[in-house]
Structure formats: C-alpha cells, structure tokens
C-alpha cells in the first residue's frame, strides 16, 4: 500500500469524525441555531464512549452512551439559546469550556487504558474493487453510517414535510407559528439531535479511529465541523466533501511523518487546519449569503 492510499484510507476514517458532527450542526443551523459547543459535545461523546466501552467491553454501547452525552450538552445549549434567549456564540463557547473541564477532570483515569474498538467491516464485493474498495468500503460501521446520513439528511431536508418545517423555522419562524407549528420545540429537537451526532463523532475518535483517550483529544474537530457547514453552504453532499478534505489533510500529515520526510513537525500539525481555512476563505462570501435568514439574524445580534 502506497502513501497516497494510506492518506485516503486514513482520510475517510478521520473525516467521518468531522462528517457526522457537521451533519448534526447543519440540522441545527437549518433551524436557526448555531452551536459552537459542537467541540464540547464531541469531547463529551468521546469520553463517555470510551468509559462505557471499557466498562462494558462493547464499543457499540460506547457509541450509544457517547450520543447521549453529546445530546445532553446540546440540550443545555438549546435551553440557554432557545428558551432563555442567550447569545448563541457565547452559549456555545460556555458549553465547550464546560465539556473541556468536565472531561479533563474525569478523563484522567482513562489515559493509557485500552478499549475494544469498533470492528472493521469489509463490504462484500465492494471492498474488492481495485484501489477504491479498501479506501471506501473497508472501515468500521460508523463510516458507513456517515455515508447513509448524508443521503438521509438530504432526503429529509428537501423531500419531506419535516424538512420543510425545519427549513422554514430557520428562515421565518413566525410563518411556522402561523401555520400551527412550534418553532421552539423544533429548534430544541434540532440542536439536541445535532449534538447527539456530534457525540457519535466523538465516539468515532475514541473507539473507532484512535482507540484511546487523552485530554482534549478532539483538537478542534468540532470547530472544523462548524466551518465545514459554512464551506458546504448548508448542503449535505458538500459537507461530505469538506469533511473528507480535512480528513485527508490530517492523514497526509501523519503519512508524511511516518515516512520520515524532513518537514517541520509544527507545520505538519497545522496542515489540516490550513487546508480547511483556505477552503473556507475561498467560499465564505458565497456561503454566508446562503445562510438561513433566522440564523443570519441571530448572528447579527451576537456581534
């Protein structure tokens, strides 16, 4: 296996930890609420999944507990922003700092411990396709869940009444109210669901991709997930592209280091974030014009 294949395979694994939280953030932002606390939700999900995985011996139990942990922090953010009308950006940062503190305190005892990871599942037939098979179809089940979620989120958003109501809530909540809907409930559910997906993304890191726990292990992945949504202009398929772009950049840095290429270590560590920042700057102006109207109003009041 050459370095390019290694980078692409690692990019799919690592990119999934961005893809699933980014899809969750897309759902929340479509309802008109941005969650900068996605990073904190991922941290909570990563530690909870590792804890449950080591305790029960089942990585799948860990994934479910990780989703619940992420959802709990998302519910806190929803309560502060939707019910109490707190500043969305400030609330998200509070959630992040809270999760960072909680996981740093309770995660100390899990450092250097091992967990039974999610098993690698080769898709029959597809995994044997030359070159593309190992890259796309020989991963743990959360990677395949990411594929399915992209299609599911697109269908729900653009082909169902639920999606129409969600998008209308993010654009004109007063119209939803006039038609008998409940924008507050919709936003709370959307933000909480999005945070649960962020928790699953954290679980992908701790019991799927890295298979261990260390403090602040998300290393900014949650903030990248929020940026990817802007890069994608709130379109699920483009979220997939943005997440894997980051994943490949991250894996490339590791592959280059493993092959002993003489490049400054700090530059290698910064490479994935530089790629994400470059892509974000390239499309930021176009993407910001396509933001849900309710989200633009909320962010305008935040600055």
Image: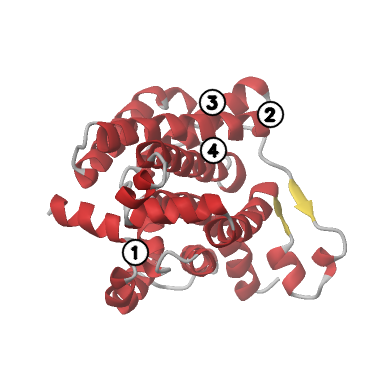
Mark 4 or 3 closer to N-term?
3
Res. 51 in view: yes
Crowding near the residue tagged with mark 4, few <14, some 14–19, many ≥20 C-alpha atoms within 10 Å: many
Task: State the residue in front, 173 or 128.
Answer: 173
Identify the residue at image location x=58%, y=48%: 209
Residues at circles 4 and 2 in contact by the CB criterion of under 8 Å: no
Give the residue pinned by disc 1. Answer: 270
Give the side of residue 87 with respect to residue 265, left or right: left
Q: Quadrant of the N terminus?
A: bottom right
Sequence-first disc among 1 and 4 = 4
Answer yes or no: do the residues labelled 4 and 3 have beta carbons within 8 Å?
no
- Give the CA distance from mark 4 to mark 2: 14 Å
Query: Is residue 300 toward the left or the right of residue 225 in the image?
Result: left
**Is label 4 in a helix, a strand or a loop?**
loop
Q: Which residue is label 4 attached to? A: 212
Residue located beneath label 2 in the image: 58
């Amino acid at each position: 296996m050459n370095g390019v294949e290694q980078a692409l395979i690692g990019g799919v694994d690592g990119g999934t930890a961005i893809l699933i939280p980014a899809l969750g953030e897309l759902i929340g932002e479509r309802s008109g609420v941005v969650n900068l606390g996605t990073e904190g939700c991922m941290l909570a999900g990563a530690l909870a999944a590792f804890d449950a995985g080591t305790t029960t011996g089942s990585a799948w139990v860990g994934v479910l507990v990780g989703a619940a942990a992420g959802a709990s922090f998302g519910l806190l953010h929803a309560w502060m922003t939707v019910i109490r009308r707190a500043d969305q950006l400030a609330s998200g940062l509070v959630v992040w700092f809270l999760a960072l503190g909680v996981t740093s305190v309770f995660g100390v005892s899990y450092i250097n411990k091992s967990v039974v990871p999610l098993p690698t599942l080769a898709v029959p037939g597809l995994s044997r396709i030359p070159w593309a098979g190992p890259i796309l179809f020989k991963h743990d089940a959360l990677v395949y869940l990411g594929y399915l979620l992209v299609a599911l989120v697109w269908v729900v958003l653009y082909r169902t009444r639920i999606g129409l109501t969600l998008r209308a809530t993010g654009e004109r909540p007063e119209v939803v109210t006039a038609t008998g809907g409940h924008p507050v409930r919709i936003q709370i559910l959307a933000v909480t669901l999005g945070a649960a997906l962020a928790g699953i993304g954290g679980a992908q890191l701790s019991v799927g991709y890295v298979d261990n726990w260390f403090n602040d292990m998300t290393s900014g992945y949650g903030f990248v997930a929020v940026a990817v949504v802007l890069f994608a202009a709130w379109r699920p398929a483009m979220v997939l592209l943005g997440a894997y772009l980051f994943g490949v950049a991250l894996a490339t840095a590791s592959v280059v280091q493993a092959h002993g290429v003489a490049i400054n270590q700090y530059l290698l560590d910064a490479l994935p974030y530089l790629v994400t920042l470059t892509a974000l700057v390239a499309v930021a102006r176009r993407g910001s014009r396509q933001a849900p109207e309710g989200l633009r109003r909320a962010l305008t009041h935040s600055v």
